[in-house]
């Protein structure tokens, strides 16, 4: 598995594997690639002839390992890479670079707008960008004063740090999620920080007592903590971003919530929060049969929220679920591994009533030692799932971590790895017309 990327180090190696597979005994096994059933129950496979690779990253100067999705602004797509760009001082950065912001046309012409260097300008952007009045806003997981940043960048590449996260008790640290714009104010989450909560997550001591935050920030940099997660019952460590539905924000936490037989420290929750900070848990996950550890954003379809869990479900390899605004949850699909798909890390996109998403693993069983290099799938709101494309690794790309972007009926996305024949390397940008 390559889930432990440079920059994503809030969890130790054993701790992250514990979340996915029960490492250390504190967590019951609930699924890693290759451990689930290999049947293809209920699965259909369609042609991927519409799939097109638009761009392959080369680490320098274009960047490497895009973990986030894309955003469209005036007909051009914009995104981030977690690594690459330029060498920069500190930790892994000297070898891999601190990440980039890039633009790409729908025909595949890529341009590197900004390379994070030195780290005072931020480092390791894991989240995508948000456009507000022609300017793009994003976050870095590290850098700045050390705990991550919120930054702005123009379409021509002028970058400016508008906020520095200062650490645990000072409003959060390590933002992993994109921002959402609500009437000119941005809202986001941090993986850690906020008010101390329960200290028994079983993860790295430096982060275990801090459950993360929801915050607002103006485009001029005025930052306000709206909510500090305390693990039980309200959740902990949000990785996915927020969505706005009629003035109320909705999101997920990857961890926390009430204890269950499968998750000693909680399997994550779906929650709502008002812009003034009133938080409510809509649904706590239990791993079986409903899934566990949601990592992506939700999507609203006609007043019902849809999302994914990275593990759990009938085959322990992740689910697609729906949840009503009042908290009624339903499992639409449980991934079975093998040629199907496994471990969706991203949220879904709605294209005329059909949902599309990615799995980080599964698909082509000849790839990655049998665990598969990931898929693109479609699913109806009734739960009929179809694999649209299975990544083959190498020059094709592998391990899509990010949600898809719909632009006039064509889906655009990224893979974190692959694209070149010399090892898995640096990732790709692709287009697919369903």
Image (cartoon, rainbow, N blue to C red):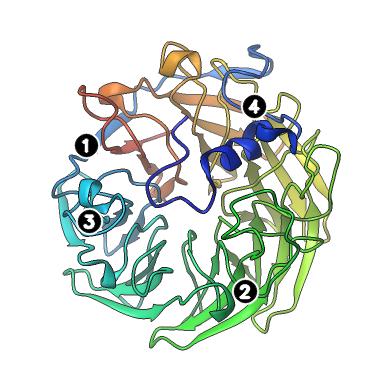
Foreground disc of the pair 4, 2? 2
Which mark is first along the chain, 2 or 1? 1
Which mark is first along the chain, 3 or 4? 3
Q: How far is disc 4 from disc 1 in space, using C-alphas?
A: 28 Å
Foreground disc of the pair 3, 2? 2
Q: Is the C-beta separation of discs 1 and 2 under 8 Å?
A: no
Query: Quarter of the image holding residue 248?
Result: bottom right
Q: Please determine whether, in this image, residue 151 is positioned above or below residue 31.
A: below
Q: Secondary structure at mark 3?
A: strand
Q: Please determine whether, in this image, residue 8 is positioned above or below residue 279.
A: above
Residue at the spot x=56%, y=60% of the render?
206
Q: Secondary structure at mark 1?
A: strand
Residue designated by label 4: 335
Q: Is the C-beta separation of discs 4 and 1 under 8 Å?
A: no
In screen coordinates, is 337 left or right of 119?
Answer: right
Q: Secondary structure at mark 4?
A: loop
Residue designated by label 3: 103
Who is closer to the viewer here, 212 or 379? 212
Residue designated by label 1: 56
- Label 4 packing within 10 angstroms: few (<14), some (14-19), many (20+): many
Who is closer to the viewer here, 302 or 293? 293
Q: Is residue 163 visible?
A: yes
Which mark is first along the chain, 1 or 4? 1
Q: Percent from the top left, x then y, of residue 65?
A: 32, 43
Q: Percent from the top left, x then y, of residue 374?
A: 46, 27
Residue designated by label 2: 194
Label at residue 387: none
Q: Please determine whether, in this image, residue 197 is positioned above or below residue 240.
A: below
Which mark is first along the chain, 1 or 3? 1
Q: How far is disc 4 from disc 2 in space, using C-alphas?
A: 34 Å
């Amino acid at each position: 598995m390559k889930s432990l990327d440079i920059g994503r180090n809030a969890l130790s190696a054993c701790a992250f594997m514990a979340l996915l597979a029960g490492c250390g005994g504190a967590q019951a096994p609930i699924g890693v690639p290759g451990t689930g059933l290999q049947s293809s129950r209920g699965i259909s496979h369609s042609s991927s002839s519409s799939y097109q690779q638009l761009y392959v990253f080369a680490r320098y100067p274009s960047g490497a390992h895009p973990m986030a999705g894309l955003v469209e602004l005036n007909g051009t797509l914009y995104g981030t890479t977690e690594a690459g760009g330029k060498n920069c001082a500190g930790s892994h950065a000297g070898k891999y670079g601190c990440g980039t912001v890039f633009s790409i046309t729908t025909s595949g012409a890529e341009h590197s707008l900004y390379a994070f260097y030195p780290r005072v300008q931020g480092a390791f952007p894991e989240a995508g960008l948000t456009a507000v009045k022609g300017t793009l806003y994003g976050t870095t997981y590290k850098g700045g004063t050390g705990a991550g940043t919120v930054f702005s960048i123009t379409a021509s590449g002028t970058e400016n740090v508008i906020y520095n996260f200062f650490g645990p008790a000072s409003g959060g640290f390590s933002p992993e999620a994109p921002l959402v714009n609500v009437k000119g104010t941005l809202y986001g989450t941090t993986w850690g920080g906020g008010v101390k909560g329960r200290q028994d997550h079983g993860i790295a001591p430096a982060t275990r007592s801090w459950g993360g935050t929801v915050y607002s920030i103006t485009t001029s940099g005025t930052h306000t903590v709206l909510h500090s997660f305390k693990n039980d019952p309200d959740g902990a460590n949000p990785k996915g971003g927020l969505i706005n539905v009629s003035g109320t924000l909705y999101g997920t936490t990857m961890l926390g919530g009430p204890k269950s037989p499968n998750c000693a420290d909680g399997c994550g929750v779906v929650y709502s929060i008002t812009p003034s900070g009133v938080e409510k848990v809509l649904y706590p996950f239990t791993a079986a049969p409903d899934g566990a550890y949601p990592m992506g954003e939700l999507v609203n379809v006609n007043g019902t929220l849809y999302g994914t869990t990275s593990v759990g479900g009938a085959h322990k390899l992740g689910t697609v679920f729906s949840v009503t605004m009042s908290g009624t949850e339903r499992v639409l699909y449980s991934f079975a591994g093998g040629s199907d798909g496994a471990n969706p890390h991203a949220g879904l996109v709605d294209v005329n009533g059909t949902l599309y998403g990615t799995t980080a693993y599964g698909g082509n069983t000849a790839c990655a030692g049998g665990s598969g290099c990931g898929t693109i799938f479609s699913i109806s709101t009734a739960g009929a799932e179809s694999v649209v494309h299975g990544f083959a690794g190498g020059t094709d790309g592998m391990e899509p971590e990010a949600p898809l972007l719909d632009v006039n009926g064509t889906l655009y996305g990224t893979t974190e790895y692959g694209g070149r024949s010399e090892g898995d390397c640096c990732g790709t940008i692709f287009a697919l017309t369903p």
